[in-house]
Image (tube, rainbow, N blue to C red):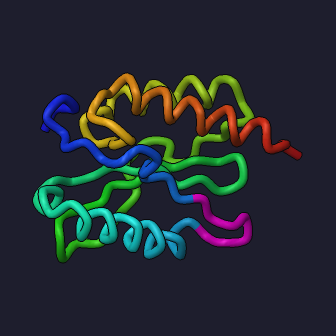
Amino acid sequence: MSATSTPELPEGRVPVKRIPDYCEWEAALPAFNDLWQEMREAWPELVEVPMGGLMVRGHYARFVYGAPEGEPARFLGRDKLDFDLSLPEDCDKFIEKADVLKEFLWAGGDSWQHTLEVLQGVVLAVRRAGIS
């Protein structure tokens, strides 16, 4: 499905889930699944549409894939799964990966440009939060 045919989601409903630093990635997947299911209940047109999202832990980020009903959410990619947003080179890889995945990432509107702006905003917010 192209980004232009994506149903518009209400502003501010970006599928980004922040998880506590002490929480393991795999253990946090159910929390993303809950968010994804909540969105699917609110917008039934998403039922057959895989939806991408993002999980942030400290200054690390991972892309997540919300599978159709009956299948669990899972992490995307066979390459580098963790993006250390404190490193400029990882930020570049993160944005590149987002561009490759654009048809699976959803934000507050149906415009891919808006989605990219949201992801760049996540990078800035994480980096501003203070990196030890």
Residue at figure coordinates x 30%, y 47% from the top left: 9
Above or below residue 81? Residue 114 is: above
Residue 82 placement (x, y as % from top left): 57, 47
Q: Where does the N terminus fall, quadrant-wise?
A: top left
- Residue 75 picture quarter: bottom left
- Residue 124 picture quarter: top right
Q: Find out whether residue 20 is within the magenta segment.
A: yes
Residue 104 placement (x, y as % from top left): 27, 42
- Residue 98 picture quarter: top left
Above or below residue 115? Residue 35 is: below
Query: Which secondary structure dominates the residues rendered in magenta?
Result: loop
> Which contiguous range is marked in magenta?
18-24
Is 79 displayed left or right of 50 in the figure?
right
Residue 32 placement (x, y as % from top left): 44, 66
Relative to the observer, which residue lies in front, 130 or 81? Answer: 130
Relative to the observer, which residue lies in front, 37 or 88? Answer: 37
The outermost residue toward the right is 132
The outermost residue toward the front is 10
Above or below residue 17? Residue 118 is: above
Is 79 displayed left or right of 126 in the figure?
left
